Each structure stands twice: as structure tokens, then as C-alpha cells.
């Protein structure tokens, strides 16, 4: 490890409704909207709470959660009760913690998304609430229900993935469970949900320490433990025109997306989003790509503080909260990422990280910049934890480096 980059402190968990986390700018609180959706009224409430109890800063996380910043400890401890009363959380802390579940953002409104997607998600959600033994799963262990469609199958990633097999399916669509490197045979909704829960229970019973998303070989052991034959997990290539993380504006039909730059917005911006939702069906649907989905609109919305132009360069950059919000960050990486976005080649994406943890984008990026005492370390086609190939002391040096990159494939 370069002397310019100190080892970060890895907490190993994320804040939850009953588990606030202390940061440099106060306590973080997080709410997990059921099935990744909330009403306009619930969004207005979150905006009010963010201003009244926090610093007004809100983040949309890569798991489709909403995070509020700058709370006092007393306000953070009172936060769960307000959310439960609003229908945004479970009264049982253990049940709430088990509900790390992502759902296709367009489920129920995209004809190309499997018709049973919401039914499947609701069934799995009920199973997670009822199965108390799964409280022993690691804090970051997650599930997803992926119905395909406009956001193609494979867009959602989790330790245990329930995926539609046939895309735009009839009411009797087939489903599969993908866990690490292994995949089940096609099953009905009920059987698929039971398989997903059984795999999670096997993970706990076997005392596994490595999540399937991080160590794919674990999947084969879990399938063997429940006595189910499995095949290799499908390799799904993202369709170029439907690259989820860069989608903003009109998607399909009367469906539109607005993306928060770097996943950040203010309370005032969230209120504006709620007002736009009221012009449609009244719902805000979360994506794991820092976006909100609106259904029933007649035109592309204009929302101050949100990106609705699909050609906006800021769609191709990622950054953590950085300084001064995080004590581990070596600089204001969010400010730098937005300023440098315009110099990035069209086909590239960029991750600007405050430290080597790479919280904002754990996967590889075309260009990764890691802040350190001597400037930004550069990693090409890698992650923040990788060894940088060079150190660029000033932002002017980074800009020149980006401008010198080839305009085609980098």
C-alpha cells in the first residue's frame, strides 16, 4: 500500500432504522421504503424530518434506501418511531433488519417486467419477516426480486437473487434463484421463495462467513446443503441502451426517471420530487442507481437539484460523502467529482473515493481516483482498494489526465 493512502476503518455494517451511525457531521439515520417505494406523503414527511432533526441533507443509497444526515443522538433515537407510524418501518427491530430486499423499480408499471414480480417480492418479504432465525445473517446480506423488462434481468445484484426466467411473462412465469455461482432450475413463485429462504437458512446453519455476492463459490455449498440440484449462474450482459446507472428522463410509456447527482439531494429537492409524483400516480419508486421513478406523467419533469437529461455527464460519476461529512475522507471528493465529470470520455465512468474503502462504488470503474495526502491516486479499470498506478497532486493534473484519455473505449 502506498504511504500516501492510509488503511480505512471498515465498520462492516450499514446504518439501519434502529442502528444509526455516527459520522463527522452528526448521526446518520436510514429508512428502507417497503418494496422500494413510498408515497408522496411519506416523501414530504422525510423532507420535514431531514430539516427539523438533521442538516437537511439526504442520500439515496445503492440499495434503494433513504439516508438522512446531521442528527443529534436524541433525534436519531426518536427517528424509528416516526417512521413506523408513517408505514416506513417494522416495529420489530430484528424483522426490520432482515428486510434487505431490492425489487425491480418498474414492477407493476412496465408491461415487459414479469407480471408476478410484486407478488414474488411481497411473498419473500413476508417470509423474511416471519423467519426470525435469519436475524443471524450478516448486516449486509441482501436479497432481490428481479422481474426483468426495461431494466433487464441481472440489473439488480444481491447475495440471493430471485429472477424471472422468461421476461414479459404471463401470470405463470417461471422463476429461478441465483446464489453466488449457482442457479436453480425454473420454479413457481412459491417454490422459488421457499428456495431463497432455505438457502439463507443454510447460510446461517453452516456458519458461513463469506457472503455469496463476495465469494460466489459459497452458492454451490448452500445448494448442496438444502439438497437441491443447481446449474451455473447465468452470465447476463447489460444491454447498451439500458445501462441502468445512466438512465434519466423518459424511460418508456408514461414512466420517467430523475437521478440525484452522486445520490445526494436536499429536503427541498425531495419535496419537489413528491410534488412531481402527485402529478402522476402519487408514488416515488427507488432505484439502486441514485434515482427516483415516476409513473403517469405527461412530460419529462424539471426538478431543481435532480438530473432528468440522459446526456448529463454527472450520470457517469460516483463519489462518497467525502470531507467534511466523513472523518476518513482525505478531501471533498463530491465537489471534485462533479467538477471533473465534464472532462470524462463519453464511454467511461469515474469513481472518486475519499479513501480506499470505495463505499460509493464497490465495483470497478473505468477511472477510479482515491484521495490521499499527496493528491489523487489513479486506478484504471479497478477499484478504490487497488494499488494506484500514479499520483496526481492537483485537480489540474487530474483534468489533464482525463482529457488525454482516448475518446473511444478506454
Image (cartoon, grey):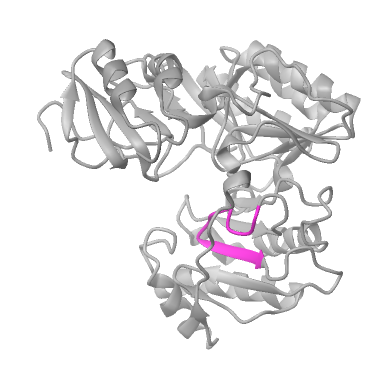
180 or 140, nearer to the observer: 180
Residue 13 is drawn in which quadrant? top left
Queried whether the magenta region covers residue 153, the answer comes back as yes
Q: Position of residue 352 (x, y in %)?
A: 36, 27
Q: Position of residue 138 (x, y in %)?
A: 45, 55
- Residue sitting at 44 percent across and 59 percent down? 213
Q: Position of residue 345 (x, y in %)?
A: 42, 29
Q: Position of residue 271 (x, y in %)?
A: 75, 17
Please say if 248 is above or below 338: below
Please say if 39 is above or below 193: above
240 or 180, nearer to the observer: 240
- Which image quadrant: the N terminus? top left
Q: Is residue 328 visible?
A: no
- Residue sitting at 62 percent across and 82 percent down? 185
- Which image quadrant: the C terminus? top left
Lateral position of residue 340 relative to residue 157, left or right: left
379 or 204, nearer to the observer: 379
Please say if 241 is above or below 307: below
Looking at the rendering, the stretch of residues picked out in magenta corresponds to: 152-163
Amino acid at each position: 500500500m502506498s504511504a500516501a493512502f492510509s488503511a480505512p476503518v471498515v465498520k462492516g455494517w450499514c446504518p439501519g432504522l434502529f442502528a444509526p451511525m455516527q459520522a463527522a457531521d452528526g448521526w446518520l439515520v436510514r429508512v428502507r421504503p417497503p418494496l422500494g417505494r413510498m408515497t408522496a406523503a411519506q416523501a414530504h414527511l422525510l423532507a420535514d424530518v431531514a430539516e427539523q432533526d438533521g442538516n437537511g441533507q439526504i442520500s439515496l443509497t445503492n440499495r434503494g434506501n433513504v439516508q438522512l444526515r446531521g442528527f443529534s443522538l436524541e433525534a436519531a433515537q426518536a427517528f424509528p418511531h416516526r417512521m413506523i407510524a408513517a408505514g416506513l418501518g417494522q416495529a420489530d427491530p430484528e424483522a426490520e433488519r432482515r428486510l434487505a430486499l431490492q425489487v425491480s423499480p418498474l414492477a407493476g408499471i412496465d408491461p415487459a417486467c414479469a407480471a408476478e414480480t410484486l407478488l414474488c417480492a411481497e411473498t419473500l418479504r413476508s417470509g423474511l419477516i416471519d423467519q426470525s432465525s435469519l436475524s443471524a445473517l450478516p448486516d449486509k446480506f441482501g436479497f432481490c426480486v428481479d422481474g426483468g423488462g426495461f431494466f433487464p434481468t441481472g440489473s439488480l445484484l444481491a447475495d440471493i437473487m430471485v429472477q424471472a426466467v422468461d421476461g414479459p411473462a404471463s401470470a405463470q412465469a417461471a422463476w429461478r434463484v441465483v446464489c453466488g455461482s449457482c442457479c436453480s432450475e425454473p420454479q413457481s413463485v412459491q417454490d422459488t421463495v421457499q428456495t431463497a429462504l432455505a438457502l439463507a437458512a443454510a447460510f446461517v446453519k453452516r456458519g458461513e462467513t463469506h457472503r455469496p455476492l463476495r465469494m460466489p463459490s459459497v452458492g454451490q455449498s448452500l445448494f448442496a446443503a438444502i439438497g437441491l440440484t443447481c446449474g451455473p449462474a447465468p452470465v447476463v450482459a447489460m444491454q447498451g441502451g439500458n445501462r441502468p446507472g445512466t438512465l434519466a428522463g423518459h424511460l418508456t410509456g408514461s414512466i420517467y426517471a430523475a437521478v440525484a447527482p452522486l445520490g445526494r439531494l436536499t429536503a427541498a429537492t425531495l419535496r419537489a420530487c413528491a410534488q412531481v409524483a402527485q402529478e402522476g400516480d402519487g408514488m416515488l419508486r427507488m432505484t439502486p442507481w441514485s434515482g427516483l421513478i415516476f409513473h403517469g406523467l405527461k412530460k419529462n419533469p424539471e426538478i431543481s437539484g435532480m438530473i432528468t437529461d440522459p446526456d448529463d455527464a454527472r450520470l457517469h460519476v460516483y463519489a462518497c460523502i467525502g470531507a467534511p461529512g466523513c472523518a476518513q475522507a482525505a478531501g471533498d471528493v463530491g465537489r471534485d467529482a462533479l467538477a471533473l465529470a465534464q472532462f470524462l470520455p463519453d464511454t467511461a465512468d469515474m469513481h472518486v473515493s475519499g479513501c480506499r474503502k470505495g463505499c460509493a462504488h464497490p465495483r470497478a470503474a473505468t477511472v477510479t481516483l482515491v484521495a490521499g495526502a499527496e493528491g489523487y491516486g489513479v486506478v484504471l479499470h479497478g477499484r478504490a482498494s487497488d494499488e494506484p498506478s500514479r499520483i496526481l497532486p492537483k485537480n489540474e493534473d487530474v483534468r489533464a489526465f482525463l482529457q488525454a484519455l482516448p475518446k473511444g473505449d478506454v
